[in-house]
Image (cartoon, rainbow, N blue to C red):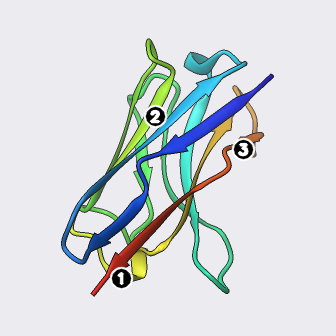
């Protein structure tokens, strides 16, 4: 069955860094675009960043541009999110998601990992 398992979340001070990982299984990872989303308490889930199936195209929400970097290793079936210069407003549950070829929406989702940024 399809699984997306996030890891790497935790508590970090403002200005610090974290690297999230998302290990995929149960589908042809190398043909899927991948994305990271986040949801803060009391807020709607929002798009953070996405990467094409080959890794050649990435896009970011304005709020994280220049601070976050998405990457993927298709051999390891893993997508990463390097988060630098973290701010308290980055506190949220972070989810990875997979979007199939020619699909308009993300079909598969992980269970999420908590990121908390303290002042």
**Label 3: few (<14), some (14–19) or many (≥20) C-alpha neighbours in 10 Å:** some
- Label 3 and label 1: CA atoms lie apart by 27 Å
Residue 51 lies, in percent from the top left, at 47, 38
Residue drawn at (40%, 61%) of the image = 10
Q: Which residue position is annotated with label 1?
A: 88
Q: From what the image shows, is residue 55 above or below residue 12?
A: above
Residue 108 lies, in percent from the top left, at 74, 39
Secondary-structure class at tag 1: helix
**Label 2: few (<14), some (14–19) or many (≥20) C-alpha neighbours in 10 Å:** many
Return the residue found at the far front: 11
Q: Is residue 34 left or right of residue 57?
A: right
| Residue in front for this viewpoint, 49 or 16 | 16
Q: Earlier in the sequence, mark 3 or mark 1?
A: 1
Residue drawn at (55%, 17%) of the image = 30
**Label 1: few (<14), some (14–19) or many (≥20) C-alpha neighbours in 10 Å:** some
Q: For marks 1 and 2, give the one nearer the viewer.
A: 1
Q: For marks 3 and 1, give the one nearer the viewer.
A: 1
Q: Is residue 115 left or right of residue 109?
A: left
Q: Earlier in the sequence, mark 1 or mark 2?
A: 2
Q: Which residue position is annotated with label 3?
A: 106
Per the rendering, the mark at residue 79 is 2
Q: Is residue 84 left or right of residue 33?
A: left
Secondary-structure class at tag 2: strand
Tell me where residue 40 sits by quadrant.
bottom right
- Label 2 and label 3: CA atoms lie apart by 15 Å
Tell me where residue 12 sits by quadrant.
bottom left
Secondary-structure class at tag 3: loop
Q: From what the image shows, is residue 28 above or below residue 85?
A: above
Q: Where's the C terminus, which quadrant?
A: bottom left
| Residue in front for this viewpoint, 47 or 119 | 119
Tell me where residue 112 sits by quadrant.
bottom right
């Amino acid at each position: 069955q399809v699984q997306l398992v996030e890891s790497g979340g935790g508590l970090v001070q403002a200005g610090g860094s974290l690297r999230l990982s998302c290990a995929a299984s149960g589908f042809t990872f190398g043909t899927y675009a991948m994305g990271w989303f986040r949801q803060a308490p009391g807020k709607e889930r929002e798009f953070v960043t996405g990467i094409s199936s080959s890794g050649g195209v990435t896009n970011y929400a304005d709020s994280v541009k220049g601070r976050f970097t998405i990457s993927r290793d298709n051999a390891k079936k893993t997508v990463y999110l390097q988060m630098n210069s973290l701010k308290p407003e980055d506190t949220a549950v972070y989810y990875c998601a997979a979007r199939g070829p020619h699909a308009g929406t993300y079909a598969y989702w992980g269970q999420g990992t908590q990121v908390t940024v303290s002042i």
